[in-house]
Structure formats: structure tokens, C-alpha cells
Amino acid sequence: MKDSSMRLVKEDGTRIDGRRLDELRPLSIEIGVLEKSDGSAYVQLGRTKVFAAVFGPKEVHPKHLALPDRAILNCRYHMTSFSVDERKPLGMTRREIELSKVIREALESVVFLEEFPRTSIDVFIEIIEADGGTRTAGLTAASLALAEAGIPMVDLVAAVAVGKIEGQIALDLSDLEDKYGEADMPIAMAPRLNSIVLLQLNGRLTREEFKKALELGKKGIMEIYQKQRDALRRKYSEEALMEV
Amino acid sequence: MPLYFSEREIVLPGQLLSDNGNRGGEGTYVLGGMVYASRLGFATLRNNKVHVIAFKGAYIPQPGDRVIGIVIDVKPNGFDISLGRHLTATIRIPDKKEVQALNLKIGDVIYANVRESGLRGVYIDHTGRIKKITSGLLVSMHPLKIPRLIGKRGSMINMIKKESGCELIVGRNGLIVIDGPSPANEFAALSAIRMIDREAHSQGLTERIRILIKNILEGEKSVEG
């Protein structure tokens, strides 16, 4: 499968896009980008571009799904049809439904759902451009959107993918590295609590490689977490002037 | 008892605020004897408790809040009231005659007190006065920005009332009734409310709103004249 002329890691230890193995792609975060939503965020990680929007807490439809003691969290991870090289058909694919579920479960573990009984909180994650690590970028954006919507949470969620390319553990895989590498492991954490809220692994890693990958992932997550906090602070530093 | 924030500092969910678990207030949670912020807002110390005042978020009714609601259902022993967004409140009256005496129909707008709010739902105090609002313009704004609309000791709301000549009834849940002598006056008050909703955090807002209302009303006069 591997193209013999293509090397994912060059002799000098850099990758196709010139990064070192333990380096993230350039990350930019914007908060409050969608006016009609209660909270929203835009995350750009290299060429991966993601919008997340949060609506609610609001009434549950259909009504019988409402829980008497807590809110339900709905999550939709969706890739726009123009986000990938070959047009993705409209509608939710099997993969998107599954990712919506794992993202929802990751977010459920940090949101205080019991503060809003009989309501629903809707999270929409829309991938505008996909270049690897969309679920992690989506989760990063979704947690920011939830925070901006004023929904009580234990902690923000920061996520990154680690993987193995040409036998070496690398941080934040791009699409090519994911496709032609040996393993891909998305990790999401609530960094302050040091608890892992999502961990998937596609491929094979030895025990040592797994430990190394997890350590590298944590390092990347702390970097992303810092940027998330900076972005939120930047957005709201002017609001602090508000005289109540 | 150290605190890990300065007064009015912007705090983010998960941020450590205090290591005394008894000091957790609104917008915080306690984990392992430490107080952390659960919402995005600014931290403040009140009555020796740490509170986080959220910038955005849903309105959570508190007992004693004055709210504006719309009757959405009439039942033999009371009414269901929509408080806007996801919130529904109930009025339960044991005496059926009293229910009829209130003479509320679906769609009526009322101004009342919250008696109880919690897991069982939101209940409106029926022993207090339930005022039926019969005229005016019903508008909504962000519930967390209502304190800004009222201003320090009512400075903002009184100024808007005076300048626009309208009577304003403000519900803590974000619904507001504007009742004025003419559509132009009501429009002026509405514009002021919209401006507060948009620019709640900026300084010198009271003065700018005074000018806004004046300009709208004068513009109206010159068209008539």
C-alpha cells in the first residue's frame, strides 16, 4: 500500500509538512463566531477546519425523551460534502453516527447535566475541511462552544490524535499520515482533572509505544488546553468591564 | 483560606478558586475539598462564598424572582406558564373557585413571583399578586443582561422610562413589556433594550442610550412636523 517514493518521516526527523514528530500543526481558535447559537467556536488545526455550535438548554423534542432529573445531550458530528477530496454524500454516514456518539459520551462526562432537568442541550460539529484529526478538533471546538454558552462544566475538553508513522510515535497526524501510517490514536482529556474522556486506537501499538503515545498526547493536549483558555480569556476580557 | 483568583477575574470552567470546600457558591463545584469554577464568568466573593457570575447561559429561576410569563395551558387546578426558552412554570391553586376568579386564558401574559424552583419544576406564587398584563409590547432579551438593563439602583431603567415616556415591566426571565403612549415611544424604548442586549459590557452605556432615545423621538417629531 505504501508508495515507495513517499517518506512520512525524512532522514532529519521532520515530517511531510516540515514538522518535528512532537509538534502540533498551527492552531487557531475563535470563540462566538455564530450569532444565532447560544455558544460557538471555530477551530483550525493545520488544514482541518471545524465549527461547533451549542443550542440550549431547551425543551426536548419529542417530549417523551426528556429525563426528569437531568438534561439530555444531543451531539451531531457532520462533515460537509466539500470537506474531503471526493465529495461526501449528504446525510450521516455510519462513521459520522459513531463519532457523534463517542463525542457525546466524552462531553457528557464533563457537563453538569443535572442542572437542567427535562431539557436538551444540542451540540453541532460541522467539519468544513478535513485533513486528519477532525474528531479531536471537533471535540476541542465543542467544549469551547459549551463553555461560551454558559453551560456548567467540570472542565474544558482538549483533544489531539497521536499515532505511529514509519515506526515512530508522532503527534497530531494529518490525513496522509493517518492513511499511510501504522496507527492512529485520538485522545481527549479533561486536563485539569487529568482524566481521559475519549481514547480510540486504530492500528497496533506495543505496550511501550502506547505509553509513549499517551505521554506525547498529554503534552499536545496541555498545549491545546492553554490555547483554549487564552482564546476564551481574550474573547471575554472586555466583558469584565461590565458594571453590574 | 487562600483564594486563587483576584476579584472580578475572568475564570474558566475547571479553574481552581479556593481550597476550602465550604466556600463554594453559585457557578462553582466542589471536588475533593476544593472549589472550582463550573462556568465561564467572573469570580467574586460574597458573604464569604465564592461565586462565578456567568456571562451567558440559561436563566435559572430563583424563589422571589419577578417574572413575566405566557399562559400556555389552563387546567382545573391551575395554569401552565411559559417563561420563554425551555422553561415552563406551573400555578397550582387548591381552590377551584380561585382558578376561575383569576380569569386567565391561553395566551394571556402575567407578571408574578416565583415561589419554588428545583427538580420538581418551577412554581409560581398564587397567594401573591398575579398581575395580568393587558397592553404593551412583549419583547425578550438575554436574561443574564437584565441586571444591566436595571442598572445601579435602577438608574438605567428609570432613565429609559423617563426619556422614552414608556412604562416598562421587566421579568427576571428576560421578558419585558413596553407600554407607551405611541408606537414611536415604544420603538425608542425597544431600541434601547436591544442596544443593552448587544453592548452590555461597554462603558458609558447609560449616556449613549439617552442620546439614542432622544434621537429617535426627535426624528419622529421632525417627520410629523
Image (spheres, rainbow, N blue to C red):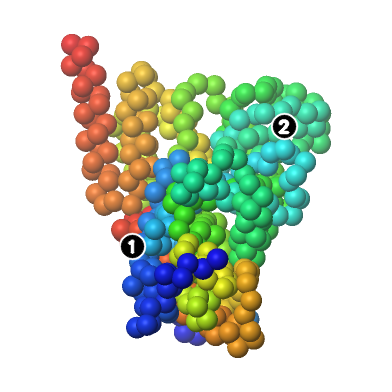
Q: Residue at x 51, y 68 (%)?
A: A2
Most extreme residue toward the front, as rendered?
A4
Q: Residue at x 61, y 30 (%)?
A: B70
Q: Residue type at mark 2: give it.
A: Phe
Question: From the viewer's perspective, is B4 left or right of A92?
Answer: left
Question: From the viewer's perspective, is A34 left or right of B132?
Answer: left
- A120 over A101 or under it: above or below: above
Q: Position of residue A177 (x, y in %)?
A: 48, 68
Are there few (<14), some (14-19), or many (20+) residues within 10 Å of tag 2? many
Q: Position of residue B60 (x, y in %)?
A: 58, 51
Chain under callout 1: A
Any mark on residue A234, and which?
1
Q: Position of residue A140 (x, y in %)?
A: 49, 62
Asked if labels 1 and 2 share a chain, the reply is no
Any mark on residue B79, and which?
2
- B49 over A123 or under it: above or below: below
- B83 over A240 or under it: above or below: above
